[in-house]
């Protein structure tokens, strides 16, 4: 089966460029779109809209006509967003609905309520993601429009068990605990954690909370020197490599919840004469990025942007047809690879809370 990666290679461009070109994204030039479409046809590529469809809910005729997707963040900033957008657009259009999209830069997240309010007037249901703050979910809860938030939110207090709003995401806290459990079973007692940024309540902070809980379950310390947060995006793994190797007793194993940073960290450690055994670092990321950064031989906790997008659309349809009087959180399945039981998915649960 021809993939976006094959088209990108033939067209000498990035996978995200191909994805956005095929979904007619306004940020891609007409010439690039024309070239990508031509190459995809020559290679015999089958569009996602023909390969993936959300099956209608049993006995339900969906009344949604227009679904809006609002991203608080730059679509080029995170490599998973193009996959989410493309999959969502394909599934929504396959059901005869219109897909609308808008975005807002992360540094303007405080203005999200006003911008989302204006955008929501033109749609019947809304999916939001990115740097979603607590006040936005408070505002969405007060509105009559059905909505789902992909991903957790930036909250005022550290309370990761709190449920506010209709959330669809992976259980990153459990992932962190599982990663520590695996490394402890390999005999490690000094386990490092590496990430670039740590927005409160979002992806990396949930992984870190799971890491700390995993260590606590084994009565192991979470030393501050073993937790390295670079403090800026695209810092890579070199700062962490330098910081750990400067310690008298550095970690013997690592948890890195992002493929690009993991690849950079592994390379930096190796270049400094201290290669990491593949069994001693757990990487968390999407399957697409695991392949892109050639990390398939490492212990992995993998997710899927496509699965997340499909779950969000299905959940929005469910909420539109049968509104619930309290917020919901849908936990999407993830997979463990090269760990306890390779490729065995973890079951999904739906948690509902008043």
Image: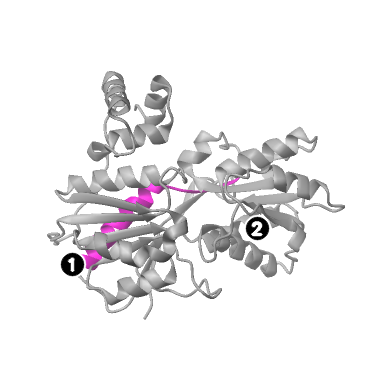
Q: Residues within 10 Å of mark 2 (few under 14, many from 20)?
A: many
Main secondary structure found in the magenta portion: helix
Q: Is residue 138 left or right of residue 293?
A: left
Would you place residue 240 above or below residue 14 in this image?
A: below
SS at mark 1 in the image: helix
Q: Nearer the viewer, mark 2 or mark 1?
A: 1
- Horizontally, residue 219 falls left or right of residue 47, namely right
> Residue placed at 66% from the left, 44% from the top?
237
Q: Can residue 298 be seen at all in this image of the molecule? A: no
Report whether residue 175 is seen: yes
Q: Residue visible at 31% across and 74% down?
A: 141
Q: Position of residue 57 (x, y in %)?
A: 20, 59
Sequence-wise, which precedes: disc 2 or disc 1?
2
Of the 4 image quadrants, the one containing the C terminus is bottom left
Q: How many marks?
A: 2
**Range covered by the magenta-colored residues:** 298-320
């Amino acid at each position: 089966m021809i993939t976006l990666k094959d088209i990108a290679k033939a067209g000498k461009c990035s996978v995200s460029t191909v994805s956005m070109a095929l979904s007619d994204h306004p940020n891609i030039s007409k010439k690039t779109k024309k070239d990508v479409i031509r190459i995809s046809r020559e290679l015999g590529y089958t569009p996602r809209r023909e390969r993936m469809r959300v099956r209608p809910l049993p006995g339900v005729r969906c009344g949604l006509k227009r679904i809006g997707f609002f991203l608080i963040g730059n679509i080029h900033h995170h490599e998973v967003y193009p996959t989410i957008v493309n999959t969502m657009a394909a599934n929504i259009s396959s059901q005869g609905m219109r897909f609308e999209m808008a975005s807002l830069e992360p540094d303007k997240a405080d203005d999200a309520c006003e911008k989302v309010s204006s955008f929501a007037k033109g749609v019947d249901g809304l999916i939001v993601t990115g740097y979603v703050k607590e006040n936005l979910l408070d505002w969405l809860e007060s509105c009559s429009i059905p909505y789902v938030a992909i991903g957790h939110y930036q909250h005022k207090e550290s309370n990761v068990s709190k449920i506010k709003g209709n959330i669809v995401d992976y259980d990153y806290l459990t992932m962190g605990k599982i990663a520590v459990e695996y490394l402890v079973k390999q005999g490690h007692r000094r386990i490092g954690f590496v990430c670039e940024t740590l927005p409160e309540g979002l992806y990396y902070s949930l992984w870190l909370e799971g890491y700390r809980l995993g260590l606590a379950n084994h009565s192991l310390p979470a030393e501050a020197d073993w937790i390295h947060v670079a403090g800026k995006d695209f810092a890579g793994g070199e700062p962490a490599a330098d910081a750990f190797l400067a310690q008298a007793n550095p970690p013997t194993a690592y948890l890195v919840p992002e493929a690009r940073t993991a690849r950079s960290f592994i390379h930096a450690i190796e270049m400094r004469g201290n290669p990491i055994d593949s069994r001693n670092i757990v990487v968390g990321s999407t399957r697409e990025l695991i392949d892109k950064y050639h990390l398939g031989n490492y212990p992995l906790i993998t997710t899927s942007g496509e699965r997340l997008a499909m779950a969000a659309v299905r959940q929005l349809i469910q909420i539109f047809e049968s509104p619930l009087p309290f917020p919901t959180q849908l936990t999407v399945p993830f997979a463990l690879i090269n760990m306890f039981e390779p490729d065995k998915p973890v079951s999904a649960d739906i948690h509902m809370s008043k």
